[in-house]
Image (tube, rainbow, N blue to C red):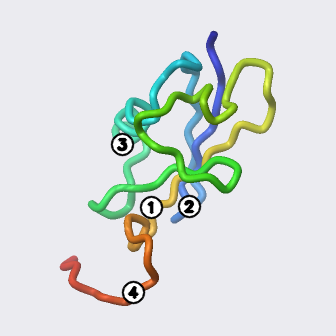
Amino acid sequence: DQVSLTVVRKSDGQSVTFVLNEKTRIHDLKHELKRRLKPRFDRGCRLIFRNQVLKGKHTLKHYGIKKGVNDQAISMDDTKDSKSSSSSSSSSDSE
């Protein structure tokens, strides 16, 4: 089944809407997302839905993103330290 979902980029609030099969893997969504709404930093991004970080190997349906469900907005955390699970303040990035 096809589902409609919106991804909102955290760094600036821009968004893009997708219509995808509910069996689409998160990895594939991120690949398409990088083409249509590029993360602000090269390190990439995390996708968050209902306070849960989405893992690439799972499908949209696995996270409850399915046909007939409203409010399917996914947050794209593309802030500078989005890949880091700790709150260290190392600044080894060169911009």
At label 2, counting other C-alpha atoms closer than 10 Å, the crowd grade (few under 14, some 14-19, many 20 or more) is: some
Residue annotated with mark 2:
10
What is the C-alpha distance between the residues marked 4 and 2? 20 Å
* Marker disc for residue 88: 4
- The one of 94 and 22 positioned closer to us in this rendering: 22
- Disc 2, SS: loop
**Do the numbered discs 2 and 3 sit on residues whose CB atoms are within 8 Å?**
no
Q: Identify the residue at image location x=51%, y=49%.
A: 47
Q: Is residue 49 left or right of residue 42?
A: right
Q: Is residue 44 left or right of residue 62?
A: left
Amino acid on which the number 4 mark rests in the picture: Ser
**Do the numbered discs 1 and 2 sit on residues whose CB atoms are within 8 Å?**
yes
**Do the numbered discs 4 and 3 sit on residues whose CB atoms are within 8 Å?**
no
The image position of residue 7, as x and y in percent, is: 58, 43
* Marker disc for residue 78: 1
Image quadrant holding the C terminus, namely bottom left
The image position of residue 54, as x and y in percent, is: 52, 45
Residue 46 lies, with reference to residue 31, above or below; the image says below
Mark toward the start of the polypeptide (1 vs 2) = 2
Mark toward the start of the polypeptide (4 vs 2) = 2
Mark toward the start of the polypeptide (2 vs 3) = 2
Amino acid on which the number 1 mark rests in the picture: Asp
* Callout in the foreground (4, 3): 4
Picture quarter containing residue 83?
Answer: bottom left
Residue annotated with mark 3:
34
- The one of 36 and 22 positioned closer to us in this rendering: 22
- Disc 4, SS: loop
Q: Identify the residue at image location x=59%, y=33%.
A: 17
At label 4, counting other C-alpha atoms closer than 10 Å, the crowd grade (few under 14, some 14-19, many 20 or more) is: few
What is the C-alpha distance between the residues marked 4 and 3? 26 Å
What is the C-alpha distance between the residues marked 1 and 3? 11 Å
